[in-house]
Image: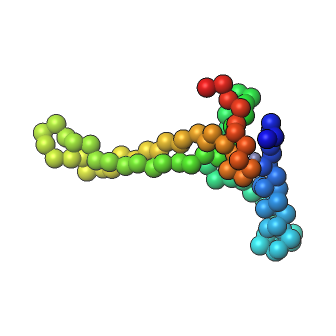
Amino acid sequence: MKDTCNCFTENLERVKNHLTESGAIPEGSIDIDVRWQNQVFILSEGDFSPVNPKINFEFRVPKKGGGHARNLRKSDISIVATHCCYCGRKYNRDD
Ligand SMILES: [Zn+2]
C-alpha cells in the first residue's frame, strides 16, 4: 500500500475544476473559495486527514435547587480518522 496520498488535495482540485467547467460557478466569477467543511489545521507536520467526522452534542445542566438550566449548552468533538476515506491508506502516526 502507498506510504502517502494526496486524496484530499486531489479531490478538492477535481471538484474546483468541475464547478467551473460545469458552470456551477459562472465564468468570470471572482473571489472563488472552495474548501473542505470542518477542515482542521494542525500546525505540526504529520500524516493526518484534514477533515474528520464531527459529533455535536447539547444538553441542559441540572440546577442546584432542582430543575434544569433554560439554555442548552452545545459543543462538539471530532474523532480523528485513522485511514484515508478515499484510498483506504492507513495514516502513519506514532500513537
Ligand atoms: Zn488517500
* Residue 85 picture location, percent across and down: 67, 50
Q: Is residue 49 left or right of residue 69?
A: right
Is 47 or 45 nearer to us in this picture? 47
Going by the picture, which residue comes out furthest to the left? Answer: 65
Residue 42 visible? The answer is yes
Q: Quadrant of the N terminus?
A: top right
* Residue 2 picture location, percent across and down: 81, 40
* Residue 26 picture location, percent across and down: 82, 73
Q: Is residue 73 left or right of residue 90?
A: left
Is 62 or 47 nearer to us in this picture? 47
Q: Quadrant of the C terminus?
A: top right
Q: Number of marks in the image?
A: 0
Q: Is residue 10 left or right of residue 40?
A: right
Q: Is residue 62 left or right of residue 47?
A: left
* Residue at 32%, 48% in the rendered image: 59
Residue 39 visible? The answer is no
* Residue at 71%, 47% in the rendered image: 88
* Residue 9 picture location, percent across and down: 79, 49
The colour style of the image is rainbow
Going by the picture, which residue comes out furthest to the front? Answer: 1
* Residue at 49%, 42% in the rendered image: 77
